[in-house]
Image (cartoon, grey):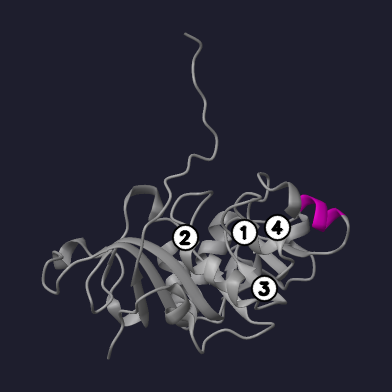
Amino acid sequence: MKKVYDNAAAALDGLLFDGMFVAAGGFGLCGIPELLLQAIKDAGTKDLTFASNNAGVDDFGIGILLQSRQVKKMVSSYVGENAEFMRQYLAGELEIEFNPQGTLAERMRAGGCGIPGFYTKTGVGTLVAEGKEHKEFDGETYILERGIFADLSIVKAWKADPTGNLVFRKTARNFNPPAAMCGKVCVVEVEEIVPTGTLDPDHIHLPGVYVHRLIQGEHEKRIEQRTVREA
């Protein structure tokens, strides 16, 4: 099965449709699939629902799709760095489903494992719990959270081999593995594709069985907030 494609547009060819549900990896500006997000913007696919830890910033990450008004709903944990996100939400132009970060990661992982739902104490007694099933276990109250089953997963890794085995670098190994697991189709962008057999099997973070399409590309190394001391 050929997994390596020439570019992001080719890797997404035939997969995009209006109203689809996309799981995207990354945390802040670290490990986000910037090339695939740009290709989705260029394709003009609209009414999208994204499950992602955050929405990037105004001109990078999912933020570029908010600017072009292609996102209908965000399932997220943190949205504090994106002014356009805030503007659309307060204006009632964007739906938001807030999830605690651990819950969101587990919802993705659960979907990837075929688990339709799980119980957690996180969020009990808060707005997060409203409308969700409550159940007692050993005298403690838990709420039911549903696994995420996305139409498409888009993630960024550091290295891959042609079969799709992935290695993530440092903090980029956060939401990328669970996001990759929960989509019907997973498309990955990497900094480097190495020959088969090069990667140490003990150092592979996500096996190629989860990966359907793969591209290599050049990526920006952005810093979300730069803090320096006075001279």
Q: Are marks 1 and 4 in contact (CB under 8 Å)?
A: yes
Amino acid at dot 2: Phe
> On residue 49, which mark appears?
3
Measured in 3D between alpha carbons, the distance from the residue under mark 3 to the one under mark 1, in whole angstroms, is 26 Å
Amino acid at dot 4: Val
Label 2: how many Cα within 10 Å (few below 14, some 14–19, many 20+): many
Label 1: how many Cα within 10 Å (few below 14, some 14–19, many 20+): some
Measured in 3D between alpha carbons, the distance from the residue under mark 4 to the one under mark 2, in whole angstroms, is 23 Å
Tag 1 or tag 3, which sits nearer the N-term? 3
Side of 178 where 137 appears, left or right: right
Tag 3 or tag 4, which sits nearer the N-term? 3
Measured in 3D between alpha carbons, the distance from the residue under mark 2 to the one under mark 1, in whole angstroms, is 21 Å
Tag 2 or tag 4, which sits nearer the N-term? 4
Read off the magenta span.
86-90
Q: Secondary structure at mark 1?
A: loop
Residue to which mark 1 is pinned: 121
Q: Quadrant of residue 113?
A: bottom left
Give the dominant element type of the magenta stretch: helix, strand or loop: helix
| Percent of width and height locating residue 142 | 64, 64
Residue lying at 62% horizontally and 49% vertically, measured from the top left: 57
Residue lying at 31% horizontally and 52% vertically, measured from the top left: 169
Residue to which mark 4 is pinned: 124
